[in-house]
Amino acid sequence: MLKMYWEALKSRCLNEKGQGMVEYGLILALVAIFAMGAFTGVGTAIINKLGEVVTALG
């Protein structure tokens, strides 16, 4: 009986399914950070160009 409990405990401790999910979460977080940086840069460039257009028209 003790061996059965030991095997169950050992299998739970050695379960590596969560490791893959953590890795995917970290990759997703990095992609999100880079995307926010890229969109911020593009948004700033668009705002500047629209400002130039408004100035040229006004």
Image (spheres, rainbow, N blue to C red):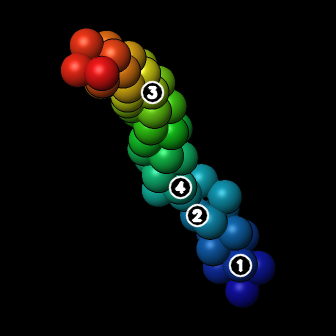
Badge 4 element: helix
- Tell me which residue sits at (65%, 79%) in the image: 4
Q: Where is residue 44 in the image (x, y as percent from the top left)?
A: 42, 21
- Tell me which residue sits at (71%, 78%) in the image: 5
Q: Where is residue 26 in the image (x, y as percent from the top left)?
A: 52, 38
| Residue 6 falls left or right of residue 17 | right
Comes first in the chain, label 2 or label 4: 2
Question: Who is closer to the viewer here, 20 or 13?
Answer: 20
Pointer 1 residue: 5
Assess disc 3: are there few (<14), some (14-19) or many (≥20) residues with their C-alpha within 10 Å of its C-alpha. few
Comes first in the chain, label 3 or label 4: 4
Type of amino acid under label 2: Ser
Assess disc 4: are there few (<14), some (14-19) or many (≥20) residues with their C-alpha within 10 Å of its C-alpha. few
- Tell me which residue sits at (45%, 33%) in the image: 36
Type of amino acid under label 1: Tyr
Assess disc 2: are there few (<14), some (14-19) or many (≥20) residues with their C-alpha within 10 Å of its C-alpha. few
Residue 39, image quadrant: top left
> As displayed, is residue 43 above or below residue 49?
below
Residue 24, image quadrant: top left
Badge 2 element: helix
* Number of disc labels: 4
Pointer 2 residue: 11
Alpha carbons under labels 4 and 1: distance apart: 22 Å
Type of amino acid under label 4: Gly
Pointer 3 residue: 40
Disc nearest the viewer among 2 and 4: 4
